[in-house]
Image: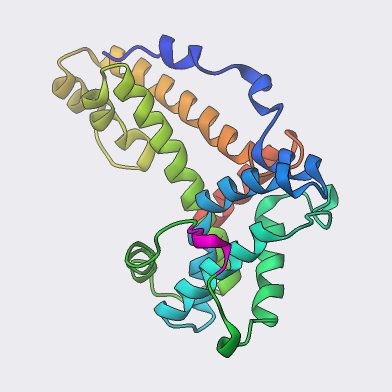
Amino acid sequence: MPSSTSQHARFDGPREFATTQWSVVLAAGGDNSRAAPALARLCSAYWYPIYAYIRRQGRNAHDAQDLTQEFFAQLIERESLAGVVKERGRFRTWLLAVLKHFLANEWHRSQRQKRGGGLAIVSLDDEAERRYLAEPIDPRTAESLFDRSWALTVVDRALSQLENEWRENGKHDHFQILKGALTGERASYSDLAARLETSEGAVRVAVHRLRDRYRILLRSEISQTVAFPNDAEDELRHLFAALGD
């Protein structure tokens, strides 16, 4: 059975939240040379909610790709990020507010030029549209789709980190069997035990530890997008609410 000892050893407790990507941007203030790399990493992680929001606003796939790249390029190229203040708190809400302003003042297409010296946050050509077309057909507003896409991105990133940890410990095959306990797949402990050739009790312990580590990674991921560690719990509640819509 997979042991969680090594996985839990990787978690450093509250110290993990001392310096996060968003807090670096906030602390840098007008010093864009310090803030831009951290902001670029955040943008690279959370590009899809932006693309989904733009598409839901009625833009076609090609225009949404261009707008997403242009938005991030302009955001990171700014000579001053002094307007980013802690009162705006959460990266998610700040990013959406900036996006709305950007779209309201969209550049003149005849004067549009590629920005960023070849900067590409992410390749949007196919992946973005495939994900967007897989979205459920519903009357969801652009804002609620943004929140749901954001939440799914956080979940996917936490799951990916968890999977990598099990792979590094030579237990990737066990993770593939047990991960359904995190994603809502129905499987009895007896079935899981049979597949893993172990006891039901051992499976219960493994699933419990897997879920604990998953919650830690979710909170860690969220903590990178808030100004203060204490805000992570509120963001987690918002995340689960967005997924439940």
Q: Where is residue 140 in the image (x, y as percent from the top left)?
A: 52, 73
Q: In this view, does 160 lie to the left or right of 56?
A: left
Residue segment shown in magenta: 115-120
How is the structure coloured here?
rainbow
Q: Which of 209 and 32 is in front in this view?
A: 32
Front residue (pair 203, 99) = 99
Residue 86 horizontal/vertical position (percent)? 83, 47
From the viewer's side, name the closer residue of 182 and 33.
33
In the picture provided, is 66 more to the left or to the right than 78?
A: left
Looking at the image, which residue is at 72% across and 60% down? 78
Q: Is residue 139 visible?
A: no
Res 219 quadrant in image: top right
Apparent side of residue 160 relative to residue 11 in the rendered image (left or right): left
Instruction: Tell me: residue 116, above or below residue 55.
Output: above
Residue 124, picture quadrant = bottom left
Residue at x 68% of width, y 51% of height: 91
Frontmost residue, 106 versus 244:
106
Quick check: is 41 in the magenta stretch? no
| On-image quarter of the N terminus | top left
From this viewpoint, is residue 3 visible?
A: yes
Picture quarter containing residue 18?
Answer: top right
For the point 51% across and 31% down, the residue is 217
Q: Position of residue 229 (x, y in %)?
A: 73, 33
Count the marks: how many? 0
What x and y, as percent, mark residue 173?
Answer: 21, 26
- Compared across the picture, whether 22 is left or right of 243 comes to right
The residue at the far bottom in this view is 110
